[in-house]
Image (cartoon, rainbow, N blue to C red):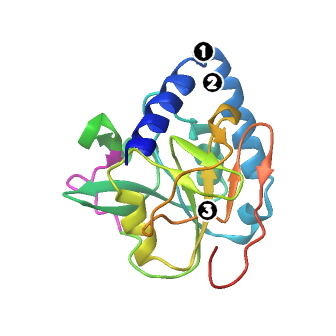
Amino acid sequence: MDQKQQLRKRMKEKRDRISPQERRQKSAKICERLLSAPEYARFQKILVYAAIRSEVELQLFCDQALRDRKQIFFPKVCGKEMEFYRIENPGQLKKGMFSVPEPDVKQYPLSSFAENGEAWILVPGVAFDEKGMRLGYGGGFYDRYLKQKENLHRTGIAFGEQIVKRIPTEIHDHPMDDVITEQQWYRPKRTTGGE
């Protein structure tokens, strides 16, 4: 665990050092890449996130996806679990746990992504490696969620500065199908049966 905590601290500091202007530019480039990806054409349902702190900002992507009539789902934390709810406009989000914008399920009758059907999930993280392994914030929300939803195409979202040579992994860690940065799209070749 110590190794993960050290890497998490170092990578958060590295990401925080990216200037707000540079972060906006890089986020815009990542959004452009996502919109032109084959996955965007393939999936009608897309599970996204609302950026906090210095994460990649997906608002441009979400705005266009809503205009294109895609079904967009944002996460909401309930205790130790996380569920995704469909929103039709950004006004249906409000600040929730950890000050993260979440679907306002009290004010709006929002439907959850309950089925285990095919969809595209865009996953934030502190760091990723080229094999698709992810270092999260340590809460395990995405690990628990991804374990329940086997049919999701998982794309890690990161700035180039967040890619490392190797992420220390544990049995419950779920690899991404691919990882996108403003510089590159990492698409690791996977064999059936895991690593």
Q: Earlier in the sequence, mark 3 or mark 2?
A: 2
Q: Is residue 42 above or below residue 47?
A: below
Q: Is residue 7 above or below residue 107?
A: above
The span shown in magenta is 102-111
Query: Is label 1 in contact with label 2 (beta carbons under 8 Å)?
Result: yes
Q: How many marks?
A: 3
Specify few, some or many for label 2: CA neighbours under 10 Å numbering under 14, 14-19, or 20 or more: some
**Residue 180 at x, y percent in the picture:** 71, 48
Q: Residue 28 occupies which quadrant of the picture?
A: top right
Indicate the amino acid at tag 2.
Arg
**Residue 166 at x, y percent in the picture:** 63, 49
Q: Is residue 37 above or below residue 51?
A: below
x 47%, y 48%: residue: 49
x 66%, y 70%: residue: 43
Residue corresponding to mark 2: 23
Q: Earlier in the sequence, mark 3 or mark 1?
A: 1
Query: What kind of element bears circle 2?
Result: helix
Residue 176 is tagged as: 3
x 64%, y 24%: residue: 24
Query: What kind of element bears circle 1?
Result: loop
Residue corresponding to mark 1: 19
| Res 96 seen here | no
Q: Residue 162 occupies which quadrant of the picture?
A: top right
Spatial CA span between label 3 and label 1: 27 Å
Pick the front one: 175 or 67:
175
